[in-house]
Image (tube, rainbow, N blue to C red):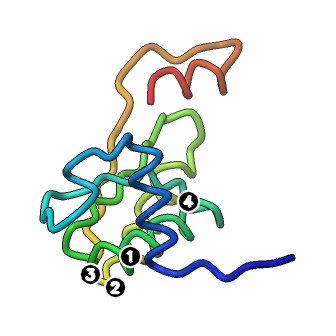
């Protein structure tokens, strides 16, 4: 059965996943970082976080590993999608050595 998610469900799941971290539950106004690749899953997560916590609290972060020529433009596009919604976005650029093998694994480890 498909169940619609509401803010209270999301906040309860966030509190459980964080071990009840005080910045994520209650009346905290602390910023919350969300990693956003621009794919459907991470975009849904950042939008749900903004609705549940308030867009002003959410900081979307995208990582440009520099492994593909189009990666920088894709990361900037995420910011362009989020800006009209009032969600702050920052692109983090990986400055490490470029791997020649196990690229996905090393990129994941760098994040």
**Tag 4, which secondary structure?**
helix
- Measured as percent of width and height from the top left, residue 108 is found at 56, 28
Height in image: 57 above or below 14? Answer: below
Label 2 SS: helix
Q: Nearer the viewer, residue 2 or 39?
A: 2
Query: Going 30% across and 72% down the picture, which residue do you hit?
Result: 53
The residue that disc 2 covers is: 85
Q: Residues within 10 Å of mark 3 (few under 14, many from 20)?
A: some
Q: Quadrant of the C terminus?
A: top left
Frontmost residue, 33 versus 63: 33
- Marks 4 and 1 sit apart, C-alpha to C-alpha, by 12 Å
> Which residue is identified by label 1?
82
Residue at horizontal 67 percent and vertical 82 percent from the top: 4
Real-space CA distance between mark 1 and mark 2, rounded to the nearest whole angstrom: 5 Å
Q: Measuring from the top left, give residue 51's x and y in whole percent.
A: 38, 81
Q: Which residue is mark 3?
A: 86
**Sooner in the amino-acid sequence: mark 4 or mark 1:** 4
Dot 4 corresponds to which residue?
Answer: 42
Q: Quadrant of the N terminus?
A: bottom right
Mark 2–mark 3 CB contact (< 8 Å)? yes
Q: Tag 1, which secondary structure? A: helix
| Mark 1–mark 2 CB contact (< 8 Å) | yes
Mark 4 crowdedness (10 Å alpha carbons): few <14, some 14-19, many ≥20: some
CA separation in Å, label 2 and label 3: 4 Å
Residue at 63% of width from left, 61% of height from top? 41
The answer to whether mark 1 and mark 3 are in CB contact below 8 A is: no
State how far apart marks 4 and 3 are (Cα).
17 Å
Residue at 21% from the left image edge and 67% from the top image edge: 57
């Amino acid at each position: 059965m498909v169940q619609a998610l509401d803010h209270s469900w999301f906040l309860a799941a966030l509190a459980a996943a964080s071990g009840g971290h005080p910045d994520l539950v209650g009346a905290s106004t602390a910023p919350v970082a969300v990693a956003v690749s621009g794919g459907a899953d991470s975009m849904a997560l950042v939008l749900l976080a903004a609705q549940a916590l308030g867009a002003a609290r959410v900081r979307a972060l995208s990582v440009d590993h520099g492994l593909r020529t189009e990666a920088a433009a894709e990361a900037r596009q995420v910011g362009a999608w989020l800006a009209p919604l009032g969600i702050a976005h920052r692109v983090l650029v990986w400055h490490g050595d470029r791997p020649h093998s196990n690229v996905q694994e090393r990129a994941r480890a760098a994040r």
